[in-house]
Every structure is written in structure tokens, then in C-alpha cells.
Amino acid sequence: MTRPAPRIVSLLPSATDLLFDLELGEHVVGVSHSCDHPGAAGRPVLTRSVVDPQAPQAEIDRAVSEAVREGRALYQVDGALLDELNPDLVVTQGVCEVCAVTPGTIDAAVRYLPGCLPAARVLSLEGRSVAGILADLTALAGAAGVPGRGAALARQAGADWQGIVPVPHAPRVLTLEWTDPPFYGGHWVPEQVERAGGVNVLGAAGTDSGRTSWTQVAALDPDVIVVMCCGYDLGENLAFARALRAPGSPARGLRAVQAGQLWATDAGALFSRPALGVVRGAAVLADLLRGHAAPGASVRV
């Protein structure tokens, strides 16, 4: 007997990317407001952010910090629409409450809807490292009924990761996931830096991103600074990086900035999401550590 095609709701962009990588795009019946895979255009949107993403970075940081401190969810899920879509599988995450919907937010959305999601499986992706991302890929493929595709993609991604040629000179690298105030990269980003041949000056593989200060950054004196503000594309990160060079910026006098070793990247595609783009992200880092920009992915500022 042929297994029925699953109806899948993806509530985070990385899961949507992985589902299309697994050739399951036609089975995605609903997405989050931040799922921007071209194939997901026009799908019903089930979430919204309670924070204005167009606000200045400092204002976003204040709003997020206040919500986290008060225990308020940063995202809302349309429970009624979720019930109407009647999915077999709902994909969410447990890595970062700031980045996307968590299982608790789904529970709150459907709590008062009798019989909602009686048969749906909720799969929470938990990868905090490159190995964890590949484990999530295989788990997602298994939950969606295509384990062979997942295993093959994971093998290829692992081979591509090992095939990245690191730079030999081991420059000291600071990655910035936010610039006002500054946050350094965590989770898989330190692995990407190390795979590219750099020495990561702040953050450890598998641990959360964290807040720092320009005083601490100046004391560390990195050779290279890479702006990869979480979820933003190359153009947006270029604007954030240029602001670091502006008169009055506390970063303007840093050695890396003065030496032309300030870079902007497409974080949404290459660094922010626990998806297969992190492999290309490490390769882009290796290129920029050699002084080479990758068209559409990185630029020297």
C-alpha cells in the first residue's frame, strides 16, 4: 500500500529550506511569516512577530529583551488556521526562542480549540551544531517518510563540509550576529569559522550567541570582523557594516575596520539558519579570509 503524502506545516525558515531540499515542497501546506524560500510563495502564513522587524537594531534589542524577561512569546501562531489546514506534521524548533516559533507557542495557540491537531506530529528541530543540523535533516526526512533522501543529502553535505580548504594563516575572526548592541555568533558559527581556517575569538561551538561590548571587542583586537546579523540578507548587513565605519561609531577605530577587514554577508542564507546553507557559509568564510568576495554572498566594506 502506498503511504499517503503528508501534509506539512513549517513554522521556521530552515525547516522550509530543508523540506524543499528533500523535494517535499509540494507537501508544505503552511509556513511562517519569515519563510522566504521561493517555492513557498503563496502558501498560507500561520505566524507573526510581535516585534517590528523594521525597527532600529537597538529598539529591537530592547523589545526582545523585555519580552524574554517578562516571559512573553515573541511570535503568535494562528491556531484556527492551523486547525483548518489539518497537517500531518508540524515542524518547529527548540534552539532559540528569539528566532522562531517553539512548541510552547503552538500549544498556547491551539489550547482552546477542541480537537485541534489530534493526529498531527510536532517535530522540534534542536540542532545547535553542524552535526546537529544533519541529524535534524535525517529526522525530518524520516518524519516525512523519505529517510533515504535525508541520508543521501546528509552524506553529501558532510562530504562538502570536509572538502572546504581552510586558509593556512589562522586569522583571528569576530562574527557579529548583531551590531547595536554587539552580539557574537554561537551555535554552529564557531565551527564555520574554524572549518574556514580562522580562530574564533568569541563564542564556542554548540553554545548560544551572546552579548559583548565594543570595549571587549577592542581588547580582543580581531584581525577580521564579519557582520552576519541574524536573519538579514547581504544588502541589509552591508548597511549595518557601513554604520560601523561611520563617524562616531565605537567600532570605527578598530584595527580590522581600519585595515579593510570588515565584511558583510548574507546571513539569512549562510549563517543564521540551521540548514544546509551553513556548509556554503563556511566556504564563503574561507574565501573572504583569503580576501575574495563571493558575489551575492559577501562583500568587503
Image: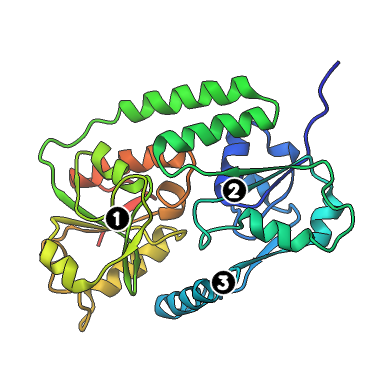
Secondary structure under the numbered disc 2 in the rendered image: loop
Q: CA distance from mark 1 to mark 2?
A: 23 Å
Callout in the foreground (1, 3): 3
Q: Position of residue 227 (x, y in %)?
A: 31, 60
Q: Is residue 119 above or below residue 238?
A: above
Residue 236 is labelled as none
Residue with the mark numbered 1: 299
Q: CA distance from mark 3 to mark 2?
A: 30 Å
Is 285 positioned to the left or the right of 89 in the image?
Answer: left
Colouring: rainbow
Q: How many marks?
A: 3
Viewer-proximal residue among 291 and 115: 115
Mark 1 is on which residue type? Val
Q: Residue at x 43, y 28 (%)?
A: 157
Secondary structure under the numbered disc 1 in the rendered image: strand
Mark 3 is on which residue type? Gly
Residue 71 is labelled as 3
Viewer-proximal residue among 23 and 93: 93
Q: Position of residue 236 (x, y in %)?
A: 41, 65
Q: Residue at x 81, y 23 (%)?
A: 3
> Which of the two labelled residues, at mark 3 and mark 2, occupies the earlier sequence position?
2
Q: Position of residue 155 (x, y in %)?
A: 46, 22
| Quadrant of image for the C terminus | bottom left
**Taking the image as drawn, is residue 251 in sight?**
no
Is 141 positioned to the left or the right of 222 in the image?
Answer: right
Q: Residue at x 82, y 41 (%)?
A: 119
Mark 2 is on which residue type? His
Q: Is residue 89 above or below residue 13?
A: above
Residue with the mark numbered 2: 37
